[in-house]
Amino acid sequence: MSSENTTETADSFLLEVEYGEMLYDNPRGISCSKCHGKGGKGGQKIAKYYDQYKNPKILKGLDITGYSFEELKASLKNRYRDENNRRVRHKIMPMYYLTDEEVKAIYSYLQDVKEK
């Protein structure tokens, strides 16, 4: 665990990375790991569908371990921008109403898992 991920205050009983793991496994009742897998590595089957030519396709969760803090924050808060700086919504990823501190905790957890 890096020292950046172990920040705690005198009144806290959880490390930031521990709080991030709790949020990742169950933020607001919907688990990140359901789509992005344990530790954010991706590959989880989300849905099976057929394209316009009736070919079967499988939608899988993305690997999010390489996201920067700003990318993760934009993704969770649905603030992606296109090349013209216009807001672009996710097609699948729901928007979560997490605080910046909660996003930082999830990011710390993903960084900690990636280092192991």
Image (spheres, rainbow, N blue to C red):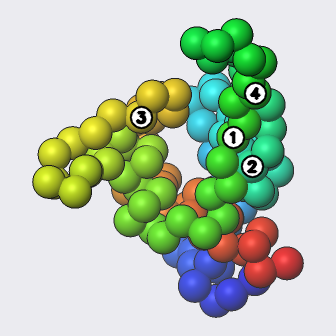
Q: Which residue is mark 2?
A: 42
Image height of 61 relative to 2, above or below: above
Asked whether the viewer can see residue 16, the reply is no
The residue depicted at 68 percent of the width and 87 percent of the height is 2
CA separation in Å, label 1 and label 2: 5 Å
Image height of 67 relative to 50, above or below: below
Left/right placement of residue 9 relative to residue 6 reads left
Q: Residues within 10 Å of mark 1 (few under 14, many from 20)?
A: many
Q: Which residue is mark 1?
A: 61
Q: Which residue is mark 4?
A: 58
Q: x, y (%) of residue 19?
A: 65, 56
Q: Quadrant of residue 16?
A: bottom right
**Amino acid residing under circle 2:** Gly
Location of the N terminus (image quadrant): bottom right
CA separation in Å, label 2 and label 3: 17 Å
Q: x, y (%) of residue 5?
A: 62, 78
Q: Which residue is mark 3?
A: 90
Location of the C terminus (image quadrant): bottom right
Q: Residues within 10 Å of mark 3 (few under 14, many from 20)?
A: few
Q: Secondary structure at mark 3?
A: loop
Asked if labels 2 and 1 touch by Cβ distance under 8 angstroms, the answer is yes
**Amino acid residing under circle 4:** Ile
The residue depicted at 57 percent of the width and 79 percent of the height is 7
